[in-house]
Amino acid sequence: MNHLCACPHCDALHRRPALRRGEKALCVRCGSVLVRRHRLAPDHILALVVAAVMVFAIANAFPIVDLRIQGLRGGTTLSGAVAALWSEGRQPMAMLVCATTQVFPLLDLGCMLALLLTASRPGRPAWFGPLLRFVQEMRPWGMVEVFMLGVVVSLVKLSGMATILPGKALLAFALLTVLMAAILSFHPHQLWNEPEHE
Amino acid sequence: MSAAEAGLMACGHCGQIMEHRDGPIACPRCGGSVRPRKPASLSRTWALLLTAIILYVPANLLPIMETSSLLVTSRDTIIGGVVYFWHSGSPGLAALIFSVSILVPVLKMCILAILALTVQFGWPLDRRQCITLFHVIEFVGRWSMLDVFVVALMVGLVRFKGLAVIEAGPGAIAFGLVVALTMLATHSFDPRLIWDSPRRALG
Ligand SMILES: [Zn+2]
């Protein structure tokens, strides 16, 4: 039954289209995307993932901005902001922020690294299927790009009361947002339709 | 023809087509558990959606941020933040925050309720438009988390002992939960149910 596929949004049955890179097929009944094949090959996505892991480390290691108010200096890393929330008794919020901006994006990158490394080799390991399902389930919860917009809004809000110097992590977060957007446009389940060795 | 009418069903994880069974079976390709439709989709959606609607009240009434400086202590609600940006000369940011924090969550809860009612009572709405609405709420849902991140950053950044301290208010966690619950509710809703019931309107 490998020549068939069903629309995930309306269950319409289609003959599985043969797609070239960068093409997508739409469902004739509901108009949703039926199947897509990313413009980049899995190997190229792998390179982006490796780059994103390094940028992720930089983004979290350095302060996002330096603040100066009347001679006093302050600044925070992302984990510093989470720790501040935790210490003032907002544990649920600290966990929510930590999960959506650090744990889930990092897990996503880690899992993608493992999946892409094995995807093009013949004979997929036993953990391939479960890991792929795991990435798909948790992917909506990584919110690096929303966080980036939050940084911009906070800076505008603070610009009235303090002098702001951009930190090293600010540029790293901007770069990470771009890299993540490219990586997230590759839906991992297309790996099932990639030939096991090209 | 739908897969169900052809006596087939698709794996929700990898798309593999297999013979229709009522009970859950393991997908031969990816090993995930497969059912023809998401289990208890409507009742789960309703439960999550109603909880989110109830929490939306404290999320808007309670302060999301408390700023204490030498002289004054101020408490900001979500709408207070919008008003602040509007008056301080950033109407663009005011519009952005209004959209993602107020417009998007309300629209999302309304649309999801309409979709669930459509399935529950067989409302004769255009099915194609229902699917478009579903894609829209799936896409925009996460952006509502913006204000939670802004509060978290402000709390982390502004810690000047004796001069100014910003703390997160209880409204922020309520709002974060509303966003998470509506995302879960959207995820629980199975859009294929819209197409299952026979209806007058043609998609
Ligand atoms: Zn469809």
Image: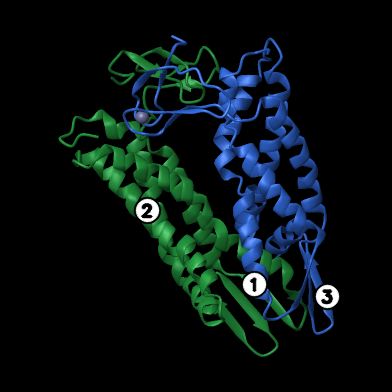
Chain colours: A blue, B green
* Residue found at x 20% / y 34%: B202
Q: Is residue B99 above or below residue A13?
A: below
Image marks 3 and 2: residues in contact by CB distance under 8 Å: no
Camera-nearest residue between A3 and B157: A3
**Alpha carbon distance from label 1 to label 3:** 18 Å
Which label number is shown at residue A66?
none
Local SS, label 2: helix
Which label number is shown at residue A73?
3
Identity of the amino acid at label 3?
Arg
Question: Disc 3: which chain?
Answer: A
Question: Which image quarter: residue B151?
Answer: bottom right
Which label number is shown at residue B109?
2
Q: Is residue B72 above or below residue B184?
A: below
Q: Which residue appears farthest toward the left when viewing the image?
A: B200
Q: Which of the two marks, 1 or 3, is nearer to us in this view?
A: 1
* Residue found at x 65% / y 64%: A152
Q: Label 2 neighbourhood size at 10 Å, few (<14), some (14-19), many (20+)?
A: many
Question: Disc 2: which chain?
Answer: B
Camera-nearest residue between B87 and B102: B87
